[in-house]
Image: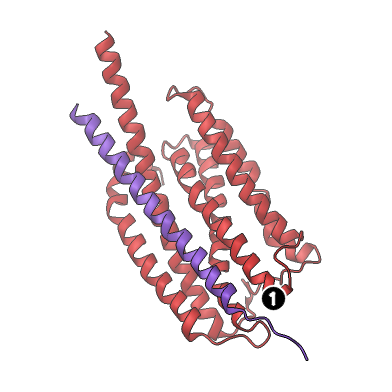
Amino acid sequence: MRETMDAWPYVIAAYAIGVGGTSAMIAWALMTMRRAESRRDAARKR
Amino acid sequence: MHGFANPARFLRLARWLMPVCLVAGIAIAFAALSWGLFVAPAERLQGQTVRIVYLHVPAAWLGMSGWMGIAAASFTELVWRHPLAGIAARACAVPGAVFTAICLITGSLWGRPAWGTWWVWDGRLTSMLVLLFLYFGWMALSQASEAADGGEGSGALRAPAIFGLVGAVNIPIIHYSVIWWNSQHQPPSITTGGSAMSGAFLWPLLIAMLGFTLIFAGVVMARMRAILANQQAEARLRRKAMAEGN
């Protein structure tokens, strides 16, 4: 009898890493952009 | 393209295009992944692991596209001295590296149930890992060159541009690796001649690729805005410091 591996834990792990990694990258890109633009605006006001 | 050599013109465009790309990309990618996870059928031989393809293939496409973006921007910088080219190359590096890493990890998670192993040192997997190391090397060189240049335009910024062009040789190696060498990885399923995939798998995959490509474009524009804003802040502070010194 051939034993089959349950693939769902691998699928869920792949989605968690893929979606989590992409979300973290988007959040980081937006956060660094906001920070840099407020730093530029502060430098203009000085 | 030279019309956007003016950073102010680029910023006017990016201010509305970046959120449009991000919002549309997130919505489309979410719909495609939900389709792939809950609606698309399991594959006859691969079973449920086929669902990983809806993440793995877009990540591979964007990992390679990110480096092609760096190479194209490097060429533009070296030949036409386009003022935004170096910034575009730097903006492509992090999202390109993130998607390459996602491709490698999801591929490994697919390989364990499908092949019975997490990793094999075959042409496709190894050349993709080399791409990730190229990204790390490029980012380190870019930062070191920027520090050496110090905003003086000393020419130190040409080093990452040359690296970006030379590193592009790895992209056709990744693409043709499954054709040139005996590989555990399957040959390309989607080619210019058509698709070997059934529509039930192909449509969610193509829509996921569109969604993630829009996310990539939005992140690159956000990074470009951040790099430009930092450069403008530093230039202003430097001018002020010089004026106060005189």
Residue B172 seen in render? no
> Measured along the vertical axis of the image, is residue B66 above or below residue A40?
below
Q: Disc 1 designates what residue?
A: B114
Q: Residue under mark 1: which chain is it in?
A: B
The C terminus of chain B, quarter of image: top left
- Place of residue A36 in the rendered image (x, y in percent of width and height, measured from the top left): 32, 39
Q: Residue furthest bottom?
A: A1
Please name the color used to draw chain B: red
For chain A, the rendered hue is: purple
- The answer to whether residue B16 of the structure is visible from this angle is yes
**Which of B146 and B191 lies nearest the eye of the viewer?**
B146
Q: Answer with the quarter of the image where residue B238 lies.
A: top left
Q: Position of residue B197 (x, y in %)?
A: 61, 81
Q: Amino acid at mark 1?
A: Ala
**Which is more toward the observer, A26 or B243?**
A26
Up-down relation of residue B146 to residue B130 (above or below): above
The outermost residue toward the top is: B246
Asked whether, in this view, residue B134 is left or right of residue B239, the answer is right
With B12 as the anchor, is B219 left or right in this view?
right
Query: Front-most of B196 and B33?
Result: B33
Looking at the image, which residue is at 51% across and 47% down?
B93
Please count the marks in the image.
Answer: 1
- What percent of the width, then of the height, locates residue A3? 73, 86
